[in-house]
Image: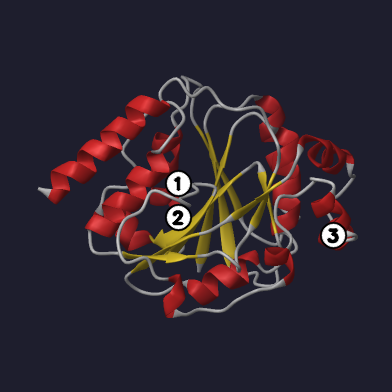
Amino acid sequence: MISILLATYNWPQALKLCLESLATQTDKNFEIIIADDGSTESTKQVIESFKGSHPAVIKHLWQEDQGFRKTKILNQAIAAAHGDYLVFLDGDCIVQPDFVERHRELAQKGCLVTGSRILLNQTLTQELLTWPNWSFARFTENLIGKRLGGGINKYWPLKIKLGNGSWRDYKKFVWRRIKGCNMACWKTDAEAINGFDETMTGWGHEDADFVFRLQHHGIHRKSGSWSTEVLHLFHKINDQSNAAENARRVREKIMAKAL
C-alpha cells in the first residue's frame, strides 16, 4: 500500500481542493496521513468533513505551532504510515487523477522519485479556490488558453505522460528539481536514514538534505517528470530567513561525504 504524507499549515481552502483531488484517483489503494505543523481549528474542521466520506483512510497528526517544524511532523507521519511506499505531498498542491497510479508505476526497490510541479498564477489560483468542488475535467478545459495567459507555466506535461526508463535516472546528487511537495521513497529507506533532519527548522532545503542522505545511503534517484506533475497553487513566498543557513548545512554534509 502507498501512504501519502500530506504536509499542511493554515490553508484549509487549498487543503480542501487537495483532498478532493485525492478522492478522484484511479488507483485507490492508499492512505492519507496529514502532517499538520500547527494549523488552527479551521483546518481540523476541513479534515473532519472528509473523514468517513473519502475513499481513503485519513489520519490527522498535529503539533503545536512553534514556527516551521515540517521535519518533525513529517517524521511522525513516516512512523505512523502503514504503507511500505511513501509519497510526500503538500497541502497547497492539487493532484491529477492518475497521480497515485503514476507513482506506483515508477516505484522501484532501491530508488526514490523526485516529482515535478506546474505553477499556477495568482488569478487562476483564486478562481479555483471559489469552485464548490475540484474538477480536473473542468480545469483542463482550454489548457492552451491557460498557458498562453500565464495561468500555468507548463502545458505539455499535462497532455503527454511518459513511462519508466533509464532516462529518468540521476547519476549523482544534484540539487536541482528536488521538490518536497512531490517526492517518494520506500518507508524502510526513510527509516534507515532516520527520516528528516529535525534540527533543520525554518523554510528551505530540508527536502534536499533528505534526498542527499538517501542517495548517500545507496538509494538511486529517479525523475518523476512527465508523469507525476502536481498543480502548485500560488501563495506568497514563505519566510526564508533560515534558508541560507539550511543550504549551508546541506553543502557541508555534501563536502564531508566527498572527503
Expressed as whole percent of the image width and height from the top left, the position of residue 22 reads 69, 57
Q: Pointer 1 and pointer 3: residues touching (CB < 8 Å)?
A: no
Q: Label 1's element?
A: helix
What amino acid type is highlighted by mark number 3?
Ile
Residue 126 vs residue 35, the one in the foreground: 126
Q: Disc count in the image?
A: 3
Question: Is residue 233 shown left or right of residue 126?
Answer: left
Is residue 63 positioned above or below 76 on the image? Answer: above
Residue 30 vs residue 153, the one in the foreground: 153
Query: What color scheme is it?
Result: secondary structure
* Mark 3 neighbour class, 10 Å CA radius: few under 14, some 14 to 19, many 20 or more: some
Question: Is residue 138 shown left or right of residue 60?
Answer: right
Would you say residue 51 is visible in this rendering? Answer: no
At x 32%, y 66%, the residue is: 171
Q: How far apart are marks 1 and 3 (CA)?
A: 38 Å
Direction front: furthest residue = 148
Is residue 236 positioned above or below 155 on the image? Answer: above
Residue marked by disc 2:
81
Would you say residue 34 is visible in this rendering? Answer: yes
Front tag of 1 and 3: 3
Residue 255 vs residue 115, the one in the foreground: 255
Expressed as whole percent of the image width and height from the top left, the position of residue 124 reads 82, 42
Quadrant of residue 55 in the image? bottom right
Q: Pointer 1 and pointer 2: residues touching (CB < 8 Å)?
A: yes
Direction left: furthest residue = 259
What amino acid type is highlighted by mark number 2?
Ala
Q: Distance between the residues labelled 3 and 2?
A: 39 Å
Q: Residue 144 carries which label?
A: 3
What amino acid type is highlighted by mark number 1?
Ala
Expressed as whole percent of the image width and height from the top left, the position of residue 30 reads 58, 64
Quadrant of residue 205 in the image? top left
Q: Which mark is residue 77?
A: 1
